[in-house]
Image: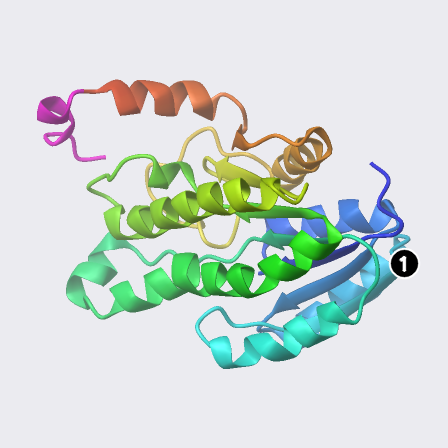
Amino acid sequence: MSASNSTWIILGATSSMARAFARQMAETGAAVFVAGRDMEDLEALAADLDARGAASAAALRFDAEDPAGFPAILSTLEATQGPLNAAVFVGWMPSQAEVDADPALIDRVAAANYTGPARFLHALAPLIEARGGTVVGVTSVAGDRGRFSNYVYGSAKAGFATYLSGLRNRLNRSGAHVVTVKPGFVDTSMTWGVEGMFLVAAPAQVAKSIAKAVEKKKNVIYTPGFWWIIMTIIKLVPERVFKKLSF
């Protein structure tokens, strides 16, 4: 994948999946902006990306729950040259029990997983339409069907996946592209200690599959790929049966 004249903005860059993907993009010679809330961690990541061959690397503050900070990032990106790409790894997953105890958390789940990322991408879309590029949106298999154990989180991811579908339809008209990524269980801090985890994937494995999907202009991928089979089966379970399940 040749990207020496392009720029990537990676949101939620301190997550393990995002780090692995950022390193892969740096090794292609792209310019990389890593964005998130922990600036100290991001600065260290940017230095690592510089050492790996990025045309340039810099840290930007991004908080999906604070849209007031979006214009400064957009202004920085507008000053770059060449194709403009964005990868969204932002997410927050409190347990269903925590949400049940404090329903106000639903607002934060929606902002972190759907409304914040969608609002940022909507503001960025005209730049991508004008210059070309790719958007990578990381959702989750949890968004394919509402499950007893995490349906608030899943509903936010489902909303984001639907937004990405519409954005793909829009950007396709200008030659840009959107890849929707639906990971299964991945070994990240967000899933640490969660019960019922199985077939857990390594972040580097997921990042590699995302990079391949970008190169081949895939529309939607499940990663690892076997999750397509699992979720196809789950989606086929009749509702009268599914509503009795407790997973």
Is 232 contained in the magenta span? no
- In terms of depth relative to the viewer, which is nearer, 105 or 187? 105
Number of numbered discs on residues: 1
Tell me if 198 is positioned left or right of 221 in this view.
left
Q: Quadrant of residue 24?
A: top right
Q: Residue at x 24, y 40 (%)?
A: 146
* Residue type at tag 1: Ala
Rendered location of residue 138, percent (x, y): 52, 46
Rendered location of residue 194, percent (x, y): 36, 47
SS for callout 1:
loop
Rendered location of residue 77, percent (x, y): 72, 68
Q: Is residue 186 depicted above or below 11 in this figure?
A: above
Quadrant where the N terminus sits is top right
Rendered location of residue 127, percent (x, y): 67, 61
Q: Residue at x 73, y 64 (%)?
A: 33
Q: Which residues are magenta?
A: 238-247
Q: Quadrant of residue 108?
A: bottom left
Residue at the disc numbered 1: 55
Residue 187 seen by the camera: no
